[in-house]
Image (cartoon, coloured by chain):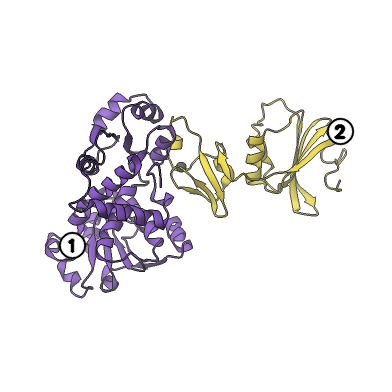
Amino acid sequence: MTEESQPIRGLLISPIRSGTVIDHITAGEALNVLKILGITGSTTESISVATNVASHRMGRKDIVKIENRELRKEEVDRIALIAPQAKINIIREYRVFEKKGVEIPKILRGVVRCPNPGCITNTNEPVESTFEVLDKGLHCLYCDWWIKTDIASHII
Amino acid sequence: MKNHIISIRDFTRREIDYLLEKAGAFDTRSYDRHALDDKLIALLFFEPSTRTRMSFETAMARLGGKSISVDSVEASSIVKGETLADTIRVVSGYADAIVLRHPKEGAARLASEFASVPVINAGDGAGQHPSQTLLDLYTIRQSMPLDGINVGMLGDLRYGRTAHSLAHALSLYGAALHTIAPPGLELPANILHDLRDRGMEVIQHEDVSDVINELDVLYVTRIQRERFPDSASFYNVTSSYRITPELLGGVQEHLLILHPLPRSGEIDAAVDRLPYARYFEQSKNGVPVRMALLHEVMQ
Ligand SMILES: [Zn+2]
């Protein structure tokens, strides 16, 4: 285990007994990660957030710890979009039970909303938004529109 | 070949060439007039386009097949509250293929996912209209090979979907694109980048007279009144982008002037008599091209 992924006891952020630690989040994106996870002021989970923490690898990074919750694949895919270097640590009884990186899937279904108001995916049709992930950005497979900037604001 | 005809972007150059050859075979006196006997197509038009609908009906009739059709007014009342997905599933049970015109972009792609018969896109909003692109290519190819030609596009290149699709298709043939558009109606940046990424040479011009003498093809698109704040600015723009006989004094002998029609003043009626004017032939070519598409998906 690297020094970075060790819980920083007492100081900024306390260790959790079980749940998920999302580490190496792109600095400044922690609040977007919470948004993706549907965590608002009124949810009951116990959350710790650290932003702009010094990191050997990234300069600055954000960390999010969530007690008693493991993430679903759709949530991890969304996080990958805004924090491609994030590491997901699943904690059980204070130990890292599993540690994995995130990967942006080649096709995103139902993850981002198409910015084109005329797109068939923005209607009541029984269809999920579908984007292919390319170097240039996200490409809607229904209407050919692109999302190239501020991907976080399009996440459903 | 393809089950559905949704977007020109789905086709390789080889597939396009194949369809154009096939259209050519239907553009003779000796084609099989019973090729689609006993076949039935459903024309579902959720927005009006009499011309496109008649062209598909004509193509089907010329191959011996039958059409059932629902026009935009009927369509909106019949399917009130019903999703397009459900309408498509129901109509799949009636017909051997569906020709769809719909105001939403991506509607034809969605329809192809719910249909149990082939779907042909006859225009989805500001999106794709592949049979138009194929008939544009077919018309050019009647006069010259598509490879490496100089094509000018004039008019509303921002909203003009026929121009976007044609430009994409021409990029497969190494054509060079010369754009001439009024301020505010230029080719969108993402389309421009996409064409250049595909290796297409795209040159933007302010005035059509700067480039017209070098062109092999001039593709004129309609400039719509509703894109302008008032009649005066619309009039100013259309009068400075109008094609007139005087403008054509030094053009190449084989120049083709095309327009997807209907036109609204972009081309002076006096141009109609010149040998360069091919827009009515272009419109007529919709029939063999659509015959080829119908035959391809139902044979
Ligand atoms: Zn879309």
B98 or A59, which lies in front?
Answer: B98
Q: Is residue B95 above or below residue B34?
A: above
Respond whether the residues carrying marks 2 and 1 are from the same subunit.
no
Q: On what subunit does the disc labeled 2 rest?
A: A
Q: What element carries label 2?
A: loop
Give the chain ID for the purple colour: B
Amino acid type assigned to the residue bearing label 1 in the image: Ala
Q: In which quarter of the image is the C terminus of chain A?
A: top right
Identity of the amino acid at label 2? Answer: Tyr
Q: Mark 1 points at which residue?
A: B277
Q: Is residue B136 left or right of residue A50?
A: left
Residue at point 35% right, 54% down? B18
Q: Relative to residue B162, is residue B14 drawn left or right? A: right
Q: Mark 1 lies on which chain?
A: B
Residue B178, how many percent across, how many down?
34, 66
Along the horizontal axis of the image, is A112 left or right of B268?
right
- Marks 2 and 1: which is nearer the front? 1
- A117 vs B267: above or below: above
Mark 2 and ligand 1: say if the CB distance to the nearest ligand atom is below 8 Å.
Answer: no
From mark 2 to mark 1, how far is it between C-alphas?
A: 79 Å
Per the image, label 1 sits on a secondary structure element best described as loop
Chain A rendering hue:
yellow
Residue B13 percent location from the top left of the image: 40, 57
* Residue projecting furthest to the bottom: B250
Location of residue A44 (image quadrant): top right
Q: Which residue is drawn at 29% across and 48% down?
A: B292
- Please tell me how crowded label 1 is: few (under 14), some (14-19), or many (20+) other residues with Cα within 10 Å: some
